[in-house]
C-alpha cells in the first residue's frame, strides 16, 4: 500500500451488488484459511483466534481486532490496515497494537478506543463512529452499529459505542460483526458476500439468534466466530450452521485450534 496513516481520504463509501465468489481451502498455521476469488482480486482469510483474523486483499493486508501476542502474527505480512471494533480485551490490546502498527499502517477504531490509544500510535489513527463511512485507497469502509438489545446484557455493549464494519472491494462486501446481538442494523444488511458473525453468552447472542439474523440478511458465505466464552457461554458452530435457512454457506475457521474445518 502506498497510503500512510496520515493520508486518509474521507469520502462516501459506495454500495455495490453481490458477485459470485469461489472458495479455496488452504492452511495458515493450525487454522483453516480460505481464498475467495472476486472481481476485485483474490481475498484470503486467515483466522488467528476467537475474534482476531487477517485478510490478504487486493487493497492490502488487513488485521481485525489483533490481540494475544505479536508473535501470533509473525507468519503474516505486515498490516496495511488495522480495524478495531471496541475496547474489550479480546478485541483491543494496546501492547499488541503498538507492536504491529508501523509507519505505513493505517489504524481505524471506534471513538472509545481512539481515546485510549497509546501516544506512539494515536497520531494519525482514525476514529469512526456508527454510521460513518470513508474511502481508504479505493476500499469503502462503513462503521456499522454493534450493541446488545437484551436488557440484562446492555451494559456489555451499549448502543452507540462499538463498531462492526462493512468493507467494499469493488462490489465484494465483507461484514464484520464485532460484538453484538442480532440487531435491526444487522438484519437490514444487503448484498453481503462474506460475513463474520459473533455468538457467545452472556456477552453477545446464542447460535439460534445468530442463525436467524444470518438467514435474514443472507450473506453468500459466513464464518461463525467469537463462539467460546466463560461461564458456559460457548456456542456450537455446527448447530449454528444447521439452523441457517437459505443458500448461505458456512465456513469453519478453526478459531480455537480445531484445525482445517473448511
Image: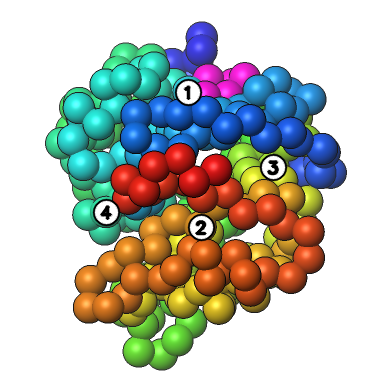
Q: Is residue 57 magenta?
A: yes
Q: Residue at x 34, y 35 (%)?
A: 30
Mark 3 or mark 2: which comes first in sequence? 3
Q: Nearer the viewer, residue 30 or 229?
A: 30
Which span is picked out in magenta? 56-60
Mark 1 or mark 4: which comes first in sequence? 1
Task: Look at discs 3 and 2 and give the one toward the viewer.
Answer: 2
Q: Residues within 10 Å of mark 3 (few under 14, many from 20)?
A: many
Q: Quadrant of residue 153?
A: bottom left
Rounded to the nearest whole Å, what is the CA distance between mark 3 and mark 2?
17 Å
Rounded to the nearest whole Å, what is the CA distance between mark 1 and mark 2?
21 Å
Q: Is 241 positioned to the left or the right of 216 in the image?
A: left
Residue identified by numbered label 2? 224
Q: Residue at x 55, y 69 (%)?
A: 240
Residue identified by numbered label 1? 61
Mark 4 or mark 3: which comes first in sequence? 4
Q: Quadrant of residue 167?
A: top right
Tell me where residue 121 appears, x and y as whole percent: 25, 29
Rounded to the nearest whole Å, what is the CA distance between mark 4 and mark 2?
16 Å
Q: Residue at x 36, y 48 (%)?
A: 258
Circle number at residue 90: 4
Q: Secondary structure at mark 2?
A: strand
Amino acid at each position: 500500500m502506498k497510503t500512510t496513516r496520515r493520508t486518509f481520504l474521507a469520502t462516501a463509501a459506495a454500495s455495490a451488488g453481490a458477485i459470485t465468489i469461489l472458495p479455496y481451502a488452504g492452511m495458515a498455521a493450525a487454522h483453516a484459511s480460505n481464498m475467495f476469488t472476486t472481481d476485485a482480486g483474490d481475498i484470503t482469510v486467515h483466522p488467528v483466534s476467537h475474534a482476531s483474523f487477517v485478510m490478504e486483499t487486493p487493497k492490502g493486508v488487513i488485521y481485525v481486532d489483533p490481540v494475544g501476542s505479536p508473535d501470533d502474527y509473525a507468519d503474516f505480512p505486515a498490516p496495511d490496515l488495522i480495524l478495531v471494533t471496541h475496547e474489550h480485551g479480546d478485541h483491543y490490546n494496546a501492547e499488541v497494537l503498538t507492536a504491529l502498527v508501523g509507519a505505513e499502517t493505517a489504524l481505524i477504531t471506534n471513538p472509545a478506543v481512539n481515546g485510549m490509544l497509546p501516544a506512539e500510535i494515536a497520531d494519525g489513527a482514525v476514529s469512526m463512529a456508527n454510521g460513518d463511512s470513508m474511502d481508504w485507497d479505493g476500499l469503502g469502509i462503513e462503521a456499522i452499529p454493534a450493541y446488545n438489545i437484551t436488557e440484562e446484557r446492555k451494559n456489555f455493549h451499549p448502543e452507540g459505542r462499538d463498531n462492526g464494519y462493512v468493507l467494499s472491494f469493488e462490489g465484494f462486501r465483507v461484514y464484520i460483526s464485532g460484538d453484538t446481538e442480532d440487531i435491526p442494523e444487522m438484519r437490514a444488511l444487503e448484498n453481503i458476500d462474506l460475513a463474520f458473525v459473533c455468538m457467545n453468552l452472556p456477552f453477545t447472542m446464542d447460535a439460534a439468534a445468530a442463525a436467524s439474523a444470518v438467514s435474514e440478511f443472507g450473506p453468500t458465505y459466513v464464518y461463525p466466530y467469537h463462539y467460546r466464552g466463560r461461564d458456559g457461554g460457548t456456542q456450537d458452530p455446527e448447530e449454528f450452521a444447521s439452523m441457517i435457512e437459505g443458500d448461505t454457506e458456512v465456513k469453519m475457521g478453526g478459531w480455537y485450534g480445531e484445525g482445517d474445518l473448511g
